[in-house]
Image (cartoon, coloured by chain):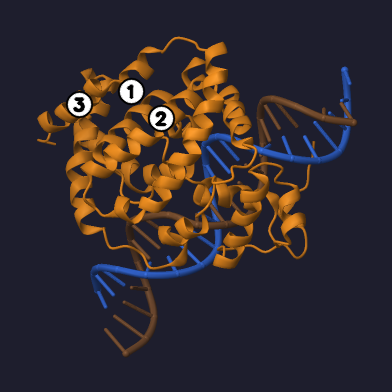
Chain colours: A orange, B brown, C blue
Amino acid sequence: MGRPPCCDKVGIKKGPWTPEEDIILVSYIQEHGPGSWRSVPTNTGLLRCSKSCRLRWTNYLRPGIKRGNFTPHEEGMIIHLQALLGNKWAAIASYLPQRTDNDIKNYWNTHLKKKVNKFQSAMEPHSSTATSHQLVSKSSNIERDESLEFASTSSTATTTYASNTENISRLLQGWMTSPPKTANNNNNNRKAEQGGGELISREVEFENMNNVAWDKSTCETTSNGVCEEDDDKVKVAENYNEKQKADVNTNSKNNNPPLSFLEKWLLDESCAGQVEEMMELSSIF
DNA sequence: AAAACCGACAACCGCTCATCT
DNA sequence: TAGATGAGCGGTTGTCGGTTT
């Protein structure tokens, strides 16, 4: 169709977002809700293209986003899902409600891909009979050991604005105390449609079902300090999710396909435990 | 101390799909 | 029905901070 890029316009600012820009964007979304991105730059006066605003919101400013180190369980899930779904980051992200697709994609590219490749090349002489599942499971074990090391060595928080979650927490104070019309539901529904088939179609439900509990559990079991930092943000997210839960439950009642095997596996806590076990068992790698 | 290198991640780009007119 | 527009996704790039030489 030959549509010109929205960011080609003269006077459109690029590069890292400033705190002022974030405040403007958050304030606007707080008032009008996410969506109608086209109108955001014109209504706010931001010298950013609509796309940039959307990305900034969905990948960074949106409530409920967990930042910081990935837990071994999260790593295992990413590896599993990547093996099963390929580079469908949005689909994978739907199973890790607090992580953005961009985050997962970056983490895969910078950490997990290398490790998995390393493992695969190590397995090369013997791998002719190994199933991909075995491969992935064993890969997960490497992730765990190395990630623990990683977590202990890389916990130095960056001091840049963009990485400071407290800034965002403050920005989001009051968000959802007067909730806007949730265009997010529409986005989620659309994502579900786009994600391709049954596997993804239930992400909305899962997301809302797990957001709060997931956050709490992961916070309690990790000791990297990230969760404490994000406490305010988590609370804000909880309110946000409560609201969404109510909306989405209505929809899911009407259209509620059965869980696939993969989903069951992923959602089943005991199975998650098995992954951990497998990780332990193959720590020889 | 400074330059070179490297890793992490935020942001951008191009494409596709859905919706609207 | 076709074109225009909005929005989302995945790949890639740019920037920045830390580490090594």
In this rendered view, identify the residue nearer to me: A132 or A80: A80
Marks 3 and 2 sit apart, C-alpha to C-alpha, by 16 Å
Q: Earlier in the sequence, mark 1 or mark 3?
A: 1
For mark 2, does the 10 Å Cα neighbourhood hold few (<14), some (14 to 19), or many (20 or more) residues? many
What number is the disc on residue A95? 2
Residue A235 position within the rendered picture, expressed as x and y whole percent measured from the top left: 41, 46
Residue A197 vs residue A272: left or right? right
Residue A116 position within the rendered picture, expressed as x and y whole percent measured from the top left: 28, 37
What number is the disc on residue A273? 3
What number is the disc on residue A266? 1
Residue A88 vs residue B4: left or right? right
For mark 3, does the 10 Å Cα neighbourhood hold few (<14), some (14 to 19), or many (20 or more) residues? few
Q: Quadrant of residue A96?
A: top left
User: Is C2 above or below relative to A146?
Assistant: above
Residue A249 position within the rendered picture, expressed as x and y whole percent measured from the top left: 51, 21
Residue A92 position within the rendered picture, expressed as x and y whole percent measured from the top left: 43, 31
Marks 1 and 2 sit apart, C-alpha to C-alpha, by 8 Å
Q: Earlier in the sequence, mark 1 or mark 2?
A: 2
Numbered disc 3: secondary structure:
helix
> Label 3 near label 1: C-beta < 8 Å?
no
**Are both tags, 1 and 3, on one chain?**
yes
What amino acid is found at the position of numbered circle 2 in the picture?
Tyr
Where is the C terminus of chain A found, in terms of image quarters?
Answer: top left
Which residue is found at the position 39% from the left and 23% from the top?
A: A84
Which residue is found at the position 80% from the left and 36% from the top?
A: A1
Marks 1 and 3 sit apart, C-alpha to C-alpha, by 11 Å
- Could one spot residue A74 in this view of the protein? yes
Q: Earlier in the sequence, mark 3 or mark 2?
A: 2
Subunit of mark 2? Answer: A
